[in-house]
Image (cartoon, grey):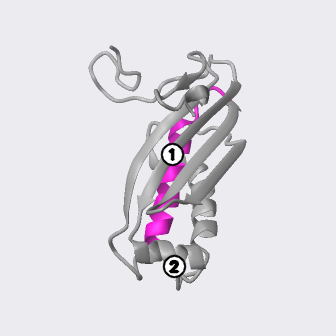
């Protein structure tokens, strides 16, 4: 298996996508922030001292998706043409789902993962004054579409998987 960001001598380099045709691409990532009962109650009540945690996390995730080339040195500068970050309060965690879309030469998996990761970090930042035990878990790509390799779903996340 050849890694795309390594040349023949094993040095890291940026893949040249100049000759690739722009196509519509999409990626979805998920993640969770596990929280104590105390945090979950303050989130449900809207009483976190720093303000609207979910709104801040959503905006942080969207902003982060547009900053991937600044964070990952081999990532391409691409147009992020759509980004949705959804947050849901579970029993003992905040569930985060980000879908990023583009019409460009390379995929948006890193943008989706970054959106989820930074949304999770924003949650931690806003609740740490109430309880420092919150932790980020299960950050992963669950779907990608478009480009040369077409559609892919993580097993267990196929559309008919429920």
Residue 99 in sight from this viewpoint: yes
Residue 69 in sight from this viewpoint: no
Q: Is 151 displayed left or right of 39 in the figure? A: right
Mark closer to the chain start, 1 or 2: 1
Q: Is 134 displayed left or right of 20 in the figure? A: left
- Indicate the quadrant where residue 133 lies: bottom left
* Magenta-colored span: 104-125
Q: Residue 123's x, y, as percent?
A: 49, 67
Which residue corresponds to mark 2? Answer: 42
Which residue corresponds to mark 1? Answer: 30
Q: Is 131 displayed left or right of 152 in the figure? A: left
Q: Main secondary structure of the magenta part?
A: helix
- Indicate the quadrant where residue 2 lies: top left
115 is within the stretch colored magenta: yes
Residue at x 63% of width, y 26% of height: 105
- Which circle, 1 or 2, is nearer the viewer? 2
Residue at x 53% of width, y 81% of height: 48
In this view, the residue in front, 78 or 59, is 59
Q: Alpha-carbon neighbours of circle 2 within 10 Å: few (<14), some, or many (≥20)? A: some
107 is within the stretch colored magenta: yes
In the figure, 118 relative to 139: above or below?
below
In this view, the residue in front, 162 or 35, is 162
Q: Residue 158's x, y, as percent?
A: 56, 27
In the figure, 42 relative to 66: above or below?
below
Per the rendering, the mark at residue 129 is none
Quadrant of the image for the C terminus?
Answer: top right
Residue at x 45% of width, y 36% of height: 74
Q: Secondary structure at mark 2?
A: helix
């Amino acid at each position: 298996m050849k890694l795309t960001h390594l040349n023949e001598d094993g040095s890291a380099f940026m893949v040249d996508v100049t000759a690739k045709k722009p196509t519509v691409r999409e990626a979805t990532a998920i993640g969770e922030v596990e929280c104590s009962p105390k945090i979950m109650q303050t989130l449900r009540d809207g009483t976190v001292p720093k303000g609207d945690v979910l709104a801040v996390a959503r905006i942080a995730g969207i902003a982060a998706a547009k900053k991937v080339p600044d964070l990952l040195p081999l990532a391409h500068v691409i147009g992020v043409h759509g980004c949705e970050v959804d947050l849901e309060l579970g029993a003992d965690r905040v569930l985060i789902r980000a879908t990023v879309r583009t019409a460009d030469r390379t995929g948006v998996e890193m943008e989706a993962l970054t959106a989820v990761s930074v949304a999770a970090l924003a949650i931690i930042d806003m609740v740490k004054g109430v309880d420092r035990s919150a932790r980020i878990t299960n950050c992963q790509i669950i779907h990608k579409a478009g480009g040369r390799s077409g559609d892919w779903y993580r097993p267990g996340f196929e559309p008919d998987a429920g």
